[in-house]
Structures are given as C-alpha cells and as structure tokens.
Amino acid sequence: MKKITKKTYLNWYEEMLFWRKFEDKLAQVYIQQKVRGFLHLYNGQEAILAGSLHAMDLTKDKMITAYRNHVQPIGMGVDPKRVMAELYGKATGTSQGLGGSMHIFSKEHRFYGGHGIVGGQIPLGAGLAFADQYFKRDAVTLTFLGDGAARQGSLHETLNMAMLWKLPVVFCVENNGYAMGTSVARTANHVEIWKLGLGYDMPCGAVDAMNPVKVAEAMDEAIKRARKGEGPSFLELKTYRYRGHSMSDAQLYRTKEEVEEYMKIDPITQVLDVIQKKKYATNEEIKAIDKRVKERVAECEKFAEESPFPENNIMYDTVYEQEDYPFLAHKPE
Amino acid sequence: MKTIQFREAIAEAMSEEMRRDETIYLMGEEVAEYNGAYKASKGMLDEFGDKRVIDTPISELGFAGIGIGSAMNGNRPIIEFMTFNFSLVGIDQIINNAAKMRQMSGGQFNIPIVFRGPTASAGQLAATHSQAFESWYANCPGLKVIVPSNPKDAKGLLKSAIRDDDPVIFMESEQMYGDKGEVPEGEYVIPIGVAEVKREGKDVTIVSFGKIIKEAYAAAEELEKENISCEIIDLRTIRPMDHKTILDSVKKTNRLVILEEAWPFGNIATEITYQVQSQAFDYLDAPIVKINTADTPAPYSPGLLKEWLPNSADVVKAVKKVLYK
C-alpha cells in the first residue's frame, strides 16, 4: 500500500471535509426545494471513501454503490460541480438531469452508479469484475452495499458466483447500523454481517470504518488478493450516518445520545487530531483548508444554479443506442 | 437453402456471432456441459471453451445482473433463461438495470445484451411454467422484444439481436426447438422491428407471432376451402412494433383478427387493437377480434389445457365473425 504520510492526512482532511460540506449544502438547498426527489447523505461515513481511495489503483480500479452516492464519484475524479448540477436536474449534470440524486454515473472515471434498488447493484459489481477478468485487465471492482442490502437475495447469489469464479471484486458492506429505520439487530438473528462470507469460504472480516487508516489497510489486503487472482473478499465496514436515511426521516428509531457518541469518534475529527498531534499543519493552514472547502462548495452551488435545464428531447435520445427508435406517442398531437 | 431444426438455428446464430466477436459469451443454466437444457447450445462448449460458454448455478437474478455488469464493461453477453418463467426472479435486473441504465446515466452506458429462452406454454406444465411475458417486457422502454416463429427468422433475428447495442429479449419455445425449416446457406441477418407477411390474402388480416401462429396457418388452410382468403402477418419483433405492415394490410382487407398466446388483459393484441383503431378507424368494416389464452393461470389436466389455449378452430370462428359469416 502507498505510505500514509503527512500529505495523505492533509488530503484526507480537505477531501473528507469537502464531502461533508457538499452534503450539508445539499441538505440546505433541498429544504429550499431546489433539489427534489429523495436525498440520502453520507455524513459520518467519509472514512470509508477516504480509506478505499487510498488503497485503489485509480488508473483502472472501479467503484459501484447504491443510492448514497454523491461523494464517491467526486472521490473517483468527477467534477463535483457536475454532481451538484445533477441534483439540481440540470443539463450539465453527470446524467444530464435524467438520473438525479440516486443515479450518479461516470464512465470516464469508472464510477458505475448510483443505483436505486437496494441490492440491485451487487451482481452488477461482480459483472464489472467478470469483464475485467475476461479481458485480463488486472483491475478490481469495489462493490459497496448497505447493511440493509446484506439481507437481499442478490447478495447471496452474487457472493456464490463471485467466489466460484474468483472474480476480482471486493464486497464492502457499509454497516451504518440502520436499514432506513430498522436496526441491524432487527433484520437477522445475528449482527455480525461479515460472517456471511464464511458460508462461501470467502475471506471476510469486520473493519473499524470510522478510521480511514483501518479502512485503507483492510481494503489494500482485499484488493491485492483480488488482483492476484485469488478472488473476492467480504468486508463489513462498521460506520455510522449522522443524518436520517433520507431527508424525510424523523429518526425516532434512535436516540440523540447515540448520535453524539458516534460524533466523538467522527472520522474527520480523527484525521484532524492526527494532523494537530503530529503538527502536520498550523492552525492557520487548517483554517485556509476550511476556507478553500467553503469556496469549492460555493462554486458547485453557483454552477448548478446557473446551469440550464435540459431540453425535452434528451428524455428520448438517451433511452436507446439506436438513433431512430420509433417511440409511441403519449399525448394527442 | 438448407433444412435445419430451430435449435440448430439458435446454435448457429450464437456460434457465428461468437466467431466474429470475442467479446460475446453465453451464460446460463446447463448451457455448457449439458449442451443446453433443450440442446440449443450443442457443441458450443467444445468450440469456444468454458471461458465463453459458462454454466451457472440456479441464480437467475445473480447471473442476469453479472451479465449486465459485464456489458457495462466491454462484453456482449447472451444470457439464457431455461425458460422466461424463471426470468421473474431476475426481472429487477432486466427492468431496472438493463433497460434503464442508458437513460439514467445520461447516455453513458448502453447495455448490449441478449436475454434468450423459451416463452409461453409447452405441454402440460401448468401454472408456473406456461406463461407469456412478452407484454410485460415490451411494456418497458429501453428493451427490444423479439419472438420468431421459424428457424430462418430465429437465426437471422438472433444475429441482429446479438449485434444490437441495446438490450434485447429474445423468446423461443420448447415446442419449436424440434421444428425444421429452410435457412439460407450463407451469412444473413434479419432486421429488428420488421414484420413479415407470411401468407398473402385479401379478405381478412390475421396478426400473430411465435409458435401459436401455426394455428393461424392451419385455420387459413381450412378457410381457403370456403373461399375465404386470409393474410397472415408474423410480427417477429414485438418492440419496436412494425405498425405499417399491419396498417397496410388492414387497409386492404378491412378486417383484423389477432392471435396471441397470452392472458387477455392488456396484452400485445390490446396494443395492436388500439393502434389500428386510432390509425385506420375508417378502414375497419368490423370490430377487431382478439384470441388469447383463458384469463386464468394455465391448468394441468389435458382437457382443461385444450380449453385454455387458443387453437385453429378459434381462428376460423374469429375470421367468420369479422366477415359476418
């Protein structure tokens, strides 16, 4: 694995803070009704993305996830302005305004969505890895899912085939404690999701995912195994989301005290503590980062606000690769 | 021309395409070592090896999704369902991922994939194994749906489906795999979205597709004896539908019977009926008649199944009805 250095920590701090503030901005503009639909935010889970990116080979490795998916493409290299614009439903968005919050994609940056059906993306992730194995590309796919998706049949069918065919994929369960409002304990008679891997003889384990170092180390081991042709791994990344499942969530299923407990081990605070303890940056330098993050978020908002909405024809043009597909009429002419 | 079985036409189409394009593979239950549950992939494992002809566990959702994921990353998979009855456990992958990926990614990811296997009834298999989901799949934008009725069309259309850059549902029949028919010796393809007039006539138009069209052929022979001339259109492609061929025929005969092996509520015949009344209302000399399966799950017992299925006598009756005879 690449060494974790002063530069890593400073980069982590700035990027994780940017993701946090980006999501906060989305919550704000959602309340202003500039962004509609569902909105699922990543606050609290940032160490997973930071650690994963550190372990990945960003020239070829791939990522796919569910609908809590705004910041992962940014981490993979997508211009955050385009992600913000997508949520605004603008033509400059990553899907030209057709996908919205739950469906962010970037072929260029190997981010394969952005999927709205819980667990639906799991076999897709194995399929991406299948193609990389087929074409001998030496690339690995990180397939993310939530603790709720761990109870879908799609996981079990996919784990079985991925292991049977030794596909270069890492299954990463982001266990944030709740499938919407249902705690992990209420979804199965066990709470250690990582043990599901044992049934498939798949290397598996749990990871303290509030700490990007721990995530990077576990991810590195799993990615190396996949790249060597030894097949998939199944990681349970123990994390927490501060905000509700989506914006309409009153969060009656948990206490404020529980949220506060997790905020004490906040991933961004943990990174900042190391920076301060090791004197990687002065207070002024940290303030400068904070200021830069704020400006970057403001630029995204400005870009999204000022971008045009898409033309009606895009709704048709994007459905089929065939250029002259004869769509049926749906209204009187 | 040469005479081959329907199953051989399927195997030839897949094999010819796999020879010309390394990105294509065939995946499904029993497709490799068993040579296909209905021998539609006979010999392919020997020719292409287990990297490209791949047996799966019984996990339709899983391998449908793996196929789609690989199609996002450079492959052109052919996914076989042992029957489309079993596609229901994987239908989320087909509808939410294959059909919608291109649109919801703003045009970034097209899915060049074929899902193929038999549709509709196949003898006394009862409720869970006798279903036709053409109208379900054809309802969904993003998909194309093909249902051939003979070896020549099957081969030419399957080759087009494999070459197509959009997801295609390709439906066969257990009861057609043994059917023999003439196919051209050399390379040929049949375009998607083009119906064919299988029998020319002047008194009435019969539209059908898939194996049930044989009942229309038999009826037309019977009716010929009574000097009633039937024009039979084989849709071949359900989505996109070739409205023009249907309308041209109806404008000539002024009468339409639609024969479809599917439940009557909101099916392909219903859609054709709407299109014809809206585009050729003034040409119709009689209300359109559609013939379907009973509005019940398929029964097992032979007498019940006979009653449940449409047959040539039903077609004869329908034709006489639209002719007021």
Image (cartoon, rainbow, N blue to C red):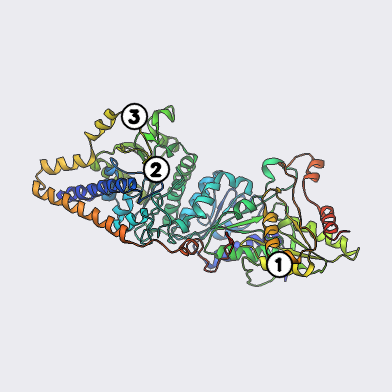
Instruction: Choose the circle earlier in sequence order: 3 or 2.
Output: 2
Secondary structure under tag 3 reads loop
* Amino acid at circle 3: Arg
Decide if residue A146 is in sight here. Answer: yes
The outermost residue toward the top is: A189
Q: Are discs 3 and 1 less than 8 Å apart at CB?
A: no
Whether residue B225 is situated above or below residue A290 in the rendered picture? below
The residue mark sitting in front, 3 or 2, is 3
Place of residue B39 in the rendered image (x, y in percent of width and height, measured from the top left): 66, 54
Label 3 resides on the chain identified as: A
Residue occupying image coordinates x 60% and y 49%: B30
Residue A119, percent from left and from top: 45, 43
Query: Residue A145, labelled with which disc?
Result: 2
Residue A254 — which label? Answer: 3
Within-10-Å neighbours for mark 2: few <14, some 14–19, many 20+ = many
- Tell me which residue sits at (29%, 42%) in the image: A43
